[in-house]
Amino acid sequence: MVAMMKAAIFIEPGRIELADKPIPGVGPNDALIRITTTTICGTDVHILKGEYPVAKGLTIGHEPVGVIEKLGSAVQGYSEGQRVIAGAICPNFNSYAAQDGVPSQDGSYLVARGLCGCHGYKATAGWRFGNLIDGTQAEYVLVPDAQANLAPIPDGLTDEQVLMCPDIMSTGFKGAENANIRIGDTVAVFAQGPIGLCATAGARLLGASTIVTVDSNEHRLSISKKMGADVTLNFKHCDVVDEIMKLTGGRGVDASIEALGTQGTFESALRVLKPGGTLSSLGVYSSDLTIPLSAFAAGLGDHKINTALCPGGKERMRRLLNIVASGRVDLGVMVTHRYRLDDIVAAYELFANQRDGVLKVAIKPH
């Protein structure tokens, strides 16, 4: 008799539902993780709305915290019963992309060949959980290439303290890293959702001396102060481009980080940028972007625009876990709501509609 588990699966645009699926078998390079905590990401909402295509019946979610239930025969250095995380991006580090320095794009050729149940090219193929393979909003998840991707959780840290590491923290910090921030820089961060808040924390850790955060939610702006913001601007109450240019004496910021994925935030992030500055784009865009001629200085402004898919792998996770363990940032405050896996549909309804001051929802399968 096949052992079964509960999993949140994509049915069609507008429907993610709980269903029974077989517990995955474990190959020699895999690890079966019993999920103790996972969460819902903004990208999952794009999937729910049909704005990002995935196969019908796919288990959604890409942020695993759990315990090793079973190890593949070739996986060394780990033990069953050990608490671990794995990055949302789980490369095998054998591909051309990985060896070319962009492991987040590991495996894109599989999609181009049509071997993953999807059509067309996805420049996101290092992101496998909940995209190309079954994800983490379930009782169990199979981690491929486990020896490259599992990171032990340091003693004394709770699930909720490390829940942001697999994606939100890695993405936000990559946004700060991609912004080429130097000590003493002025940085503007547009949108203070979970990723934007992590970008703010990352900018502070990298040495920015003035961080300006932009949002319309006063609660999120207040949390951004705790993450390192010096100035908060509510775009409903002021022209943020004018305010930032005044703040910088007309010079513009050294770096801007766009953390929402809309034309408006992207354009504002470009307009406040100094000549020679860097725009770091983190948003997941669901429609074409237009670059305004004046903001782009007709292409003559020496601007740099960097995009990112969050880094994964056990070394990236180890570094993020070290930051959490050091106490330099406390991202556990982002968990505002808690749901059982049985109530995943209600959790999606809350999160997708941004009700009740939600930032992140902890999903507990067991």
Image: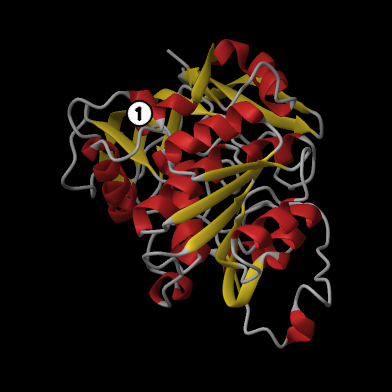
* Residue 167 seen anywhere in this rendered image of the structure: no
Closer-to-camera residue (105/245) = 245
Q: Position of residue 78 (x, y in %)?
A: 19, 40
Q: Amino acid at mark 1?
A: Gln
Query: Residue at the location (60% across, 38% down)?
Result: 193
* Residue 341 seen anywhere in this rendered image of the structure: yes
- Which quadrant of the view contains residue 256? bottom right
Of all residues, the one furthest to the bottom in this rendering is 300
Q: Position of residue 148 (x, y in %)?
A: 31, 54
Q: Position of residue 274 (x, y in %)?
A: 62, 73
Instruction: Name the side, left or right, on which 355 lies relative to 319.
Output: right
| Element type where label 1 sits in the image | helix
Instruction: Name the side, left or right, on which 337 lies relative to 103.
Output: right
Instruction: Name the side, left or right, on which 217 lies relative to 69.
Output: right
Instruction: Name the side, left or right, on which 276 lies relative to 64.
Output: right
Q: Position of residue 210 (x, y in %)?
A: 47, 55
Report the coloring of the rendering: secondary structure
Query: Residue at the location (58% across, 11% down)?
Result: 342
Quadrant where the C terminus lies? top left
Closer-to-camera residue (94/292) = 292
Closer-to-camera residue (344/233) = 233
Relative to 97, residue 354 above or below? above
- Which quadrant of the view contains residue 235? top right
Query: Residue at the location (40% across, 27% down)?
Result: 332
Relative to 78, residue 302 above or below? below
Per the image, the residue denoted by label 1 is: 161
Closer-to-camera residue (158/70) = 158
10 Å crowding of disc 1: few (<14), some (14-19), many (20+): some
Count the marks: how many? 1
